[in-house]
Image: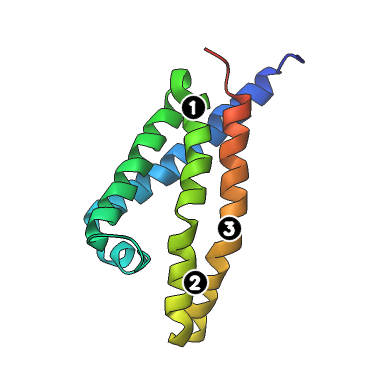
Amino acid sequence: MIPRSPADTRTDRRLAAGLAGLLGVAAVLHVVRPEPFDSIVPRSMPGEPRFWTYASGAAEGAVAAAIAHPRTRRAGGWAAAGLFAAVFPANVSMALRWRDKAPVLRAVGWGRLPLQVPLVLWALRIARTAPRR
């Protein structure tokens, strides 16, 4: 294994802090403003959309905490990659439901889909570069 330079280690910590922050903000928004998240829960999901909004917010908060802590960062990175894959159907649902919206909203709906790829890659980088504990 090639030793990592101090600059690489600082970059890795910053990347982890950034993703933890992004996920933490998303988690809070799921609780504070759940309505937009309720509206994109796929209709095929059982139960009430609010349950899935809160559950996904709790998952985002737990993953954010795991990434933020060096001992759990590796597992948190893998969990984040899985979480981003798991919420992809909600993003597809949103894009489909927004077909009749204003052109800007349609663009946002469809534009979110390819953004999942860099998020997954970001999470995988964190998982792969976190020190083994």
Q: Which mark is residue 115?
A: 3
Residue 127, percent from left and from top: 57, 29
Secondary element at tag 3: helix
Q: Nearer the viewer, residue 38 or 17?
A: 38
Residue 120, percent from left and from top: 58, 45
Identify which residue is drawn at 44% across, 37% down: 20
Residues at discs 1 and 2 in contact (Cβ within 8 Å): no
The three-letter code of the residue at mark 1 reads Ala
- Neighbour class for label 1 at 10 Å: few (<14), some, many (≥20)? some
Residue sticking out furthest to the right: 2
Question: Which residue, given by chain and number where applicable, does mark 2 sit on?
Answer: 109
Secondary element at tag 1: helix
Q: CA distance from mark 1 to mark 2?
A: 30 Å
Identify which residue is drawn at 46% across, 50% down: 86
Q: Is residue 42 left or right of residue 18?
A: left
Q: Quadrant of residue 3?
A: top right
Q: Nearer the viewer, residue 125 or 89?
A: 89
